[in-house]
Image (tube, helix red, strand yellow):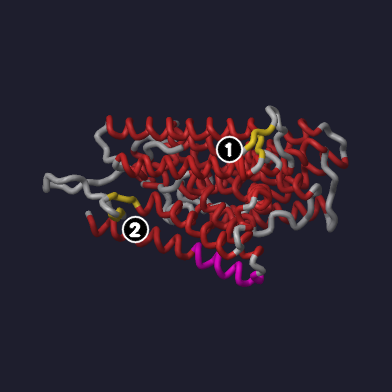
Amino acid sequence: MSSITPADVEVGAKGDGGPPRRPGRVSLGGLSLNLRSSGIYIAFALIVALFSVLTDGALLTPQNISNIIVQNSYVLILAIGMILVIIAGHIDLSVGSVVAVTGGLAAVLMVNMSVPWPLALLITLLAGALIGAWQGYWIAYFGIPAFIVTLAGMLLFRALTLTVLGNQGIGPFPDQVRTLANGFTSGYLGNIGLGALGGADLFSLLVAVAAVAGMVAAQWRSRTARQGYGQVVDPMAVFVLKMAAGAALILFLVVQLARFNNLPWVLVLLAVLVLAYSLMANRTVFGRQVYAIGGNLQAAVMSGVRVKSVVFWIFVNMGVLSAVAGIIFAGRLNQAGPTAGNAFELDAIAAAFIGGAAVQGGVGKIVGAITGGLIMAVINNGMSLIGSPSERVMLVKGAVLLAAVAFDVWTKRRAGAAR
């Protein structure tokens, strides 16, 4: 879902009486395409196509698609919070350690202390919020750079994890928590025949159709609003092409999942988070203030934005999402371990930048961060399927991250030159 954000405003040419110039756009067969906003999705499609060929189609099998989602769900959850932090012009290096300490806390509460799992999860989320508030205070109100505060937090919370868990894991978790991390929705309406594809869960297919309808309605409403304000929009042919591509992706994904074990519960959780945070970022005052702070801090202050309060709550939110990721990760492994969350912060930051976040802040979308995380997941999974060694995987991921940031810098320079 997308709407008008400060990053979407196009600057037109002055004094020439012609149509607005749109830096970063290219023409393909008479169709104008915005590379900055659409490039990540094109790159994702090309990467999926490449690994589909290299793996002889194994990448897109129902079971493998399900594995990609379940095994990378916690990184995608972290990416949702990280993109907001980066849009505001900050960074959070502590999320991996917060994942570990909150997962450990949940294990101690549910396993060692026999606290009912709903109450244990609530306490864990509250602990994540308190951790975010602790770091947000030093950043927003004391003025210490986020890099330093969260670097200290990475060490502090890893030490606290080792203190709580020692050198051993704690488990197993209750069935409800494991189901959230690893389970699948039931076939509520039975299966329906799909010809050569076999059968698939009817309820999951109806969910896919509803998702497509919602996506098209939201995009059409956004397009109409832009036209009402006199802003430049994509040609109708490009709009229809984007909607068709999005619908095809959603339907293909859900059909494949419905042919395996139906929808993973963690995918349902991710869908709710993406929808909620997209609405918050694009259609609320708080979301627009986040963009304003990252885009031009001085202008935001002069406009009356309560910068300190907004930054504080951004880090509180990051702490809560880190706790959610900690619960999911521990539930998937069925135990909380002292090494949980190692390098998760790097994966989340990479997902945000690959997904279109700007290095200087002020630019980025929730859906873009999810796409960036999926690109990293497909690279990991695809190279594993073809038997690539770990060092080659790291090499490719590093190259992709560098290319994404280089592309962001290049488009900014082109935009500056066009003006």
- Residue 228, by quadrant, is top left
Instruction: Depth check: give the residue in front, 121 or 379.
Output: 379
Seen at 64% across and 52% down, the residue is 61
Residue of label 2? 411
Q: Which secondary structure type mostly characterizes the magenta part of the structure?
A: helix
Q: Do the residues labelled 2 and 1 touch (CB within 8 Å)?
A: no
Say if residue 162 shows up in the picture. yes
Q: Give how far apart the Cα atoms at labels 2 and 1 are.
A: 30 Å
Q: What residue type is labelled 1?
A: Ala
- Residue 377, by quadrant, is bottom right
362 to 52, vertically: above or below:
above
417 to 79, vertically: above or below:
below
160 to 207, vertically: above or below:
below
146 to 397, vertically: above or below:
above
Side of 200 relative to 360 (left or right)? right
Span highlighted in magenta in the image: 388-401
Q: Which amino acid does label 2 sit on?
A: Thr
Seen at 37% across and 53% down, the residue is 36
Horizontal and vertical percent position of residue 281: 46, 37
Horizontal and vertical percent position of residue 209: 53, 32
As for residue 392 lying within the magenta part, the answer is yes
Give the position of the C terminus as an image quadrant.
bottom left
Residue of label 1? 271
Furthest residue toward left: 16
Seen at 53% across and 35% down, the residue is 275
As for residue 411 lying within the magenta part, the answer is no
| Foreground: disc 2 or disc 1 | 1
- Pointer 2 or 1: first along the chain: 1
Seen at 29% across and 49% down, the residue is 31
Is disc 2 placed on a helix, strand or loop?
helix
Side of 317 relative to 284 (left or right)? right
Say if residue 133 shows up in the picture. no
